[in-house]
């Protein structure tokens, strides 16, 4: 979703709405952009990450991104301990 067509838009969206998730994928960001996000996510809790994901899914589903988002969430859940 972030590397294909419109990927920059998705990265911008994540930077605005779910920065704690975006910093978990540093390969998507330039070093300057990653450094710029670090202060915004410093000390983030699990609750904040969950809230960001829920709010992001709500926004993405309004523009027809339901299937990719649900797939991403299921994959993340399987990878969690």
Image: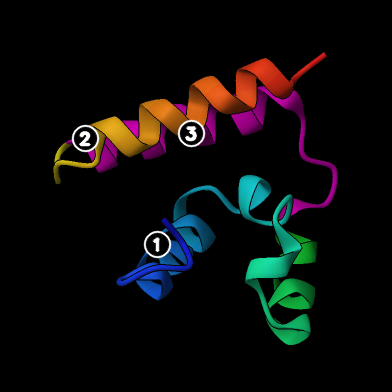
Q: Please identify the quadrant where the C terminus is shown.
A: top right
User: What span is colored magenta in the figure?
Assistant: 41-61
Within the image, what quadrant is residue 47 found in? top right
User: Which callout, 2 or 3, points to the residue nearer the camera?
Assistant: 3
Within the image, what quadrant is residue 79 found in? top right
Closest to the observer: 41 or 3? Answer: 3
Could you tell me what secondary structure mostly forms the magenta stretch? Answer: helix
Within the image, what quadrant is residue 50 found in? top right
Residue marked by disc 2: 61
Q: Is residue 60 above or below residue 42?
A: above
**Which numbered disc flags the more N-terminal residue, 2 or 3?**
2
Residue marked by disc 1: 10
**Which numbered disc flags the more N-terminal residue, 3 or 1?**
1
Q: Which residue is drawn at 62% across and 18% down?
A: 77
Q: Residue placed farthest to the left in the image?
A: 63
Give the distance between the C-alpha atoms of the residues marked 2 and 1, in whole angstroms: 13 Å
Mark number displayed over residue 72: 3
- Contact, CB < 8 Å: mark 2 with mark 3? no
Please rate how many residues cluster around mark 1, counting C-alpha atoms within 10 Å: few if below 14, some from 14 to 19, many from 20.
some
Mark number displayed over residue 28: none
Measuring from the top left, give residue 75's x and y in whole percent: 57, 26
Closest to the observer: 9 or 2? Answer: 2
Q: In this view, does 21 lie above or below 16?
A: above
Relative to 16, 33 lies left or right: right
Measuring from the top left, give residue 74's x and y in whole percent: 51, 20
């Amino acid at each position: 979703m972030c590397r294909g067509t419109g990927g920059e838009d998705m990265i911008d969206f994540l930077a605005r709405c779910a920065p704690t998730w975006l910093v978990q994928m540093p390969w998507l960001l330039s070093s300057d952009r990653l450094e710029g996000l670090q202060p915004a996510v410093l000390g983030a809790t699990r609750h904040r990450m969950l809230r960001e994901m829920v709010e992001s899914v709500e926004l993405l589903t309004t523009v027809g991104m339901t299937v990719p988002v649900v797939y991403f969430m299921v994959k993340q859940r399987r990878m969690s301990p």
